[in-house]
Image (cartoon, rainbow, N blue to C red):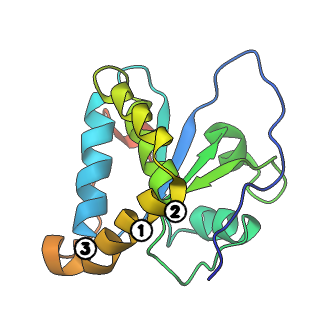
Amino acid sequence: MGDPARADAAPASEEPSRLLLLYDGTCGLCHGLVRFLARRDRRDALRFAALQSDLGRTIVTRSGGDPEVLETLYAARDADRLAADPEGAPLSVQVKSRAAITAIASVGWPWRALTALRVVPRPLLDLGYRLVARTRYRLFGTRACEIPSPEERQKFLG
């Protein structure tokens, strides 16, 4: 599968948009990442949806990815607009290592320091990402969908 590229350009906005993180809903590592981010998202900057959801599948397809391949993390800008109109809203997507860095950095300091990793060439970062993606079920297992706490429920779309 070729790397899904940035799709349509997102319009400029005065208000910062929320980031939608699409993750493998059966992956133990992905669940851990989502729980980590949801608990630290004090600015309410993140929304989450499983790749397996209708919303996830639509965004993956629109960004040039294969919705049957669950090894790629996607971070899409303007989560609220995408949730309301997944087929027509402008789409700005990051994938793999860039998606992970953007999502983790979005929860603020000290995690924002990870943006320094952007100086590492993307192919090198994505190589590390692919190695983890291939072994994640073996290392972290699989999980059934967990019910988010009432405080976290608004963060989950799709």
**Dot 3 amino acid type:** Arg
Residue identified by numbered label 1: 127
* Residue found at x 32% / y 73%: 131
Q: Quadrant of residue 58?
A: bottom right
CA gap between label 3 and label 2 equals 20 Å
* Residue found at x 64% / y 29%: 17
Q: Is residue 82 left or right of residue 67?
A: right
**Dot 2 amino acid type:** Pro
* Residue found at x 31% / y 60%: 30
Residue identified by numbered label 3: 136
CA gap between label 2 and label 1 equals 6 Å
Label 2: element kind: helix
In the image, residue 72 sits, relative to residue 36, either above or below, namely: below
Q: Quadrant of residue 66?
A: bottom right
Residue identified by numbered label 2: 123
Residue 10 rendering spot, x and y as whole percentages: 80, 39
Q: Is residue 4 left or right of residue 11?
A: left
**Dot 1 amino acid type:** Leu
In the image, residue 22 sits, relative to residue 144, either above or below, namely: above
Residue neighbourhood size for the residue with mark 2, other residues' Cα within 10 Å, grouped as few (<14), some (14–19), many (≥20): few
Q: Which mark is residue 66?
A: none
In the image, residue 112 sits, relative to residue 64, either above or below, namely: above
Residue 90 rendering spot, x and y as whole percentages: 81, 46
Q: Are marks 2 and 1 in contact (CB under 8 Å)?
A: yes
Residue 91 rendering spot, x and y as whole percentages: 76, 50
Residue 19 rendering spot, x and y as whole percentages: 55, 39
Residue 7 showing in the rendered view: yes
Number of numbered discs present?
3
Label 1: element kind: helix
CA gap between label 1 and label 3 equals 14 Å
* Residue found at x 83% / y 44%: 9
Q: Looking at the picture, tell me which residue is in the foreground, 142 or 100.
A: 100
